[in-house]
Image: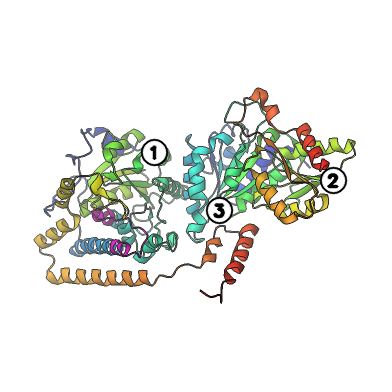
Amino acid sequence: MPQLTMAKALNEGLRKAMEDDPKVVLMGEDIGKLGGVFRVTDGLQKDFGEDRVFDTPLAESGIVGTAIGLAIRGYRPVCEIQFDGFVFPAYDQIVSQLAKMHARSKGTLKMPVVVRIPFGGGIGAVEHHSESPEAYFAHTAGLKVVSCSNPVDAYFMIQQAIKSDDPIIFFEPKRRYWEKAEVDTSMTPDSLWGARVVRPGTDVTLLAYGPMVKTCMDAATAAEEDGRSLEVVDLRSMSPLDYATVFESVRRTKRLVVVHEAPSFVGLGTEIAARVSEELYYEMEAPVLRVTGFDTPYPPSRIEEEYLPDLDRVLHVVDRSLAY
Amino acid sequence: MPAKDSPLATATETTPVATSSTAGPELVQLLTPEGERVSHPDYDIDLTDEEYRGFYRDLVLTRRIDVEATALQRQGELGIWAALLGQEAAQVGSGRALRPQDFAFPTYREHGVAWVRGVDPLRLLGLFRGVDNGGWDPIATRFQLYTIVIGSQTLHATGYAMGINKDGAVGDAETGEATIAYFGDGASSQGDVNEAFVWASVYNAPIVFFCQNNQWGISTPTANQTRIPLYQRARGFGFPGVRVDGNDVLASYAVTRKALDDARTGQGPTLVEAFTYRMGAHTTSDDPTRYRLASELEAWKLKDPLERMKAFLYKQQIVDNTFFESVEADADELAARIRKGCLEMPDPDPLSMFDSVYAEQTPLLAQEREEFGRYLAGFQGAHA
């Protein structure tokens, strides 16, 4: 089995999707000859031609707006937004047009559009290059929102997203692009919509997605030395959200800590805390706690390590949970 | 690919005019306000008597749809209505220029194009009554659902046109495909419209940008949107622009027909500015007496698109009173059908709001639908 970085796994997944369906086209800024600023589309224009992998003018609303038209024409566009902070010029087209087209046409117009967004911090970038805007999209009816946390998921989830007839915002944890894993391309993948217990445990459930899954895994390893058994759940899909897997885990551990880079206020953790409280009120030993970025703009990169949840902050909150 | 030599050359030769508030010498016209047929070196067309009559009939029926819908709104049967009064010629002319394989992307005011495209006017009323967001089939009619956020649809149309190119469906003058994107003078300021111009230009997309400059964006005059005539903007984007008398159905038809045929044969986009006037309010919620002069309205009344076509038909002696009577009878019948259909239009099932949000339903929506259904059912049999 080949060892692939997440960026390469995404590249291979895109390649497979394009081989499987001639209607799949890739569009975005600098994705052709350059292969994208993170090289996720490296070599694809060379192999599939400029008709199927094309560099667009530098205007994000135009990227998503024309992708909608291509979808009406029967194509399955995969848009690359170069960085998380650059998605907002396309926000109107995503929220007002892409998300609603299926409902307002009573299902006549399918919108099999994938919007790929490298997201999150930790790479020492300048402002607008390290943001976590997933909650804006998870809040929007008509969109589905997913994030891969490892190369295996990256390879399969991008293909599953492209096969979906619903519009999907596909968040790629940019600081994990270079992490490697063996990818068995012959295996049968899990459902795109399912959360997954990636490390079983008994004392506290850590719930994360994208870049924070590795942080939580590291925290669980460290906690083990102190005799604490932490379960880690990779949410994978933020919308729809696999509550069944979350509830099942928390029923066993009776404690839940949600971890994400995005700010806490009205974030994914807020929604999860409310649902879990409603469902498991009598079974919990502690309130749902959150470890998140602060409710500030993303800070300058020299202090981003203080902003981002890390192993110590996760374990600190685990201690709080266990103290109830 | 940049625009071809000839259209670019045409655009380059265009002389700027001082203001956009008057129809300058560059206005393409085939029918004067008095109903005189005039020729034009670039846009001459040859129509049969039957076609002339067809144009007139569509103009009358379109106006009748609009008048009836306005009345229905006043009587509380529609939540709102965006009247097209005054813009019938721009819409009927451009709509009839479409070939069956062409795809139109409208705003929320293209009732005349919808009529020509074969969309049942009742489906338009459904949107404004609030029973759905447009109940027609956009694929079957090749007429996209109305778009409310101004300018957004120009990008959709451009993307669709890019798909036509990818399918290799351009080149043939008969079977080649093209798209038309409708928008207004107000939307011309939107970023999306300008991005659509850029995209269409660099990808040489088979598209016609059809701007109905009706002089007003609610209360905002065109002078607040542009310092140059809107059609001249095309030049900066690298494709031709042309201004047509939007109250002249024949010129609107001829100019759009040529632009569409240029697009379908691989010559790229054209911007058509149909110079017209919104005779009514922006919508039934608007009061134009607060911001514009009655004298302006009076001046435009003299350019009425129906009256000039009627005068032309009389002068040509290709109709008689029986024809006009039969068109009026058709209009009366249509209005009666619209009224009846509107009054009988049922409200949707509340639970339908959960359907079709996704192609693949989510557990959350399935649960909300089920729970809300049970909640509603709890009221059944209860005393009112």
In this rendering, the answer to whether A289 lies above or below B70 is above
Q: Which amino acid does the dot numbered 1 rest on?
A: Asn
Q: Earlier in the sequence, mark 3 or mark 2?
A: 3
Residue contact at pointers 1 and 3, CB within 8 angstroms:
no
Q: Do tags 3 and 2 sit on the same chain?
A: yes
- According to the image, label 2 marks what residue? A203
Residue at the far bottom: name it. B381
Residue A230: x %, y % from top left = 83, 43
- Check the residue under mark 3 and report the chain it is in: A
Left or right: A219 in relation to A27: right
Other-residue count near label 2 (Cα within 10 Å), few / some / many at <14 / 14–19 / ≥20: some
Residue B266: x %, y % from top left = 37, 45
**For the point 84% across and 46% down, which residue is it?**
A201
Q: Which amino acid does the dot numbered 2 rest on?
A: Asp
Residue B275 visible in the current orientation: no
Whether B339 is among the magenta residues is no
**CA distance for labels 1 and 3:** 27 Å
Q: Is mark 2 on a helix, strand or loop?
A: loop
**For the point 19% across and 55% down, which residue is it?**
B305
Residue contact at pointers 2 and 1, CB within 8 angstroms:
no
Residue contact at pointers 3 and 2, CB within 8 angstroms:
no
Q: Residue A142 carries which label?
A: 3
Which stretch appears magenta? B70-93
B245 or B217: nearer the viewer? B217
In this rendering, the answer to whether B324 lies above or below A91 is below
Residue A323: x %, y % from top left = 83, 41
Left or right: B37 in relation to A173: left
**CA distance for labels 2 and 1:** 57 Å
- According to the image, label 1 marks what residue? B194
